[in-house]
Amino acid sequence: MHRGPERAQPRAMLLPLLLAFAVTAVSAGLGVVTYRLARAFWPVTDKDGADLAAMVIVRVGILHALIVALAFAEVKQNEMQTRQLVAEEAVTIADVFYDLQRYGREQTAAEQRLAVRYAQQVIGRDWPELDRSGALSLEAWRTWRELLEHVLDLDPANRRQELVHARLVRNVYLVEEQRQKRLIDAHEAPHPFFWFAAVVGLIVICGCLAPYPPRRSTHALVATFAGFTGAVLYLAYDVTTPFSGLSVIEPSGFETFLRQSEPAEIIARMR
């Protein structure tokens, strides 16, 4: 059975890790530079001015944290829905396979092979394509269409086959719907306003730290805060790309289906 996505995973993880480190470092540097520039142009401030700046920092910080938390919660919920959708798609194609056997094991041998081939192409074609370009593979689409045509051409001979056939048609069309939703979920992302507000909030907070003297501890705290914010923003972005990056959704449901005895037997005969 083709397990390309799993073999490529260690190498595919290297670039997202490097990007996460780079975003964290750039954010830390941006925070320190912002602080230093604000420090250079900030007027002389007494204790009351410093207290006022601290008050502004607290209020802006709360608002900034709320914006980031809400956006992160939204994208995380979208990712969880995508994981559930992928699992449901695997269950649907498994239902199609076993309903074909209920319809007639020998009569639907070709259709069973198509169902197995579709699951193989989801793993071996769809996932690399989603990772590379955010699109679905043409091979899997062709197999799905061929499976649909075969199922529609079935001619039920009795009441049992009529019931099974109706379920087959419904589930094959459901696979198409789930594929389309999977494609849409691959491009879900927060509104651009979120990224603008998050970066501006980071700059405002670091700028408002200007009344505090430029000690090593001050620079360390500014860099830590800005770097942590950058890391969180990168994680929020990473969650919006569920088929690539650090938090990758794997086609484990399809792999489980193909490991079952009857699909595995068909795969062995196809080789």
Image (cartoon, helix red, strand yellow):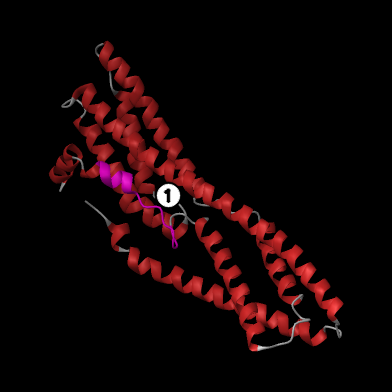
Amino acid type, callout 1: Leu
Q: Is residue 142 above or below residue 169?
A: below
Boundaries of the magenta span: 244-257
Q: Residue at x 16, y 44 (%)?
A: 270
- Quarter-wise, where is residue 169 in the image? top left
Q: Is residue 62 above or below residue 156?
A: below
Q: Residue at x 82, y 85 (%)?
A: 41
Horizontally, is 179 left or right of 117 in the view?
right
Horizontally, is 183 left or right of 33 in the view?
left
Number of numbered discs = 1
Q: Position of residue 207 (x, y in %)?
A: 75, 76
Q: Is residue 149 above or below residue 23?
A: above
Question: In this view of the protein, can residue 145 be seen by the observer?
Answer: yes
Outermost residue toward the front? 47
Question: In this view of the protein, can residue 156 be seen by the observer?
Answer: no
Q: Which one is in front, 248 or 132?
A: 248
Horizontally, is 136 left or right of 118 in the view?
right
Q: Secondary structure at mark 1?
A: loop
Q: Position of residue 263 (x, y in %)?
A: 20, 39
Horizontally, is 192 left or right of 170 in the view?
right
- Quarter-wise, where is residue 192 in the image? bottom right
Q: Position of residue 147 (x, y in %)?
A: 31, 34
Q: Is residue 99 above or below residue 129?
A: above
Task: Answer few, some or many: residues within 10 Å of disc 1's Cα (few below 14, many 20 plus, some between 14 and 19).
Answer: many
Q: Circle 1 sits on which residue?
A: 136
Q: Residue at x 34, y 49 (%)?
A: 251
Q: Which one is in front, 134 or 35?
A: 35
Query: Does the magenta segment cover residue 63?
Result: no
Q: Position of residue 133 (x, y in %)?
A: 46, 58
Q: Which one is in front, 212 or 43?
A: 212
Outermost residue toward the top? 159
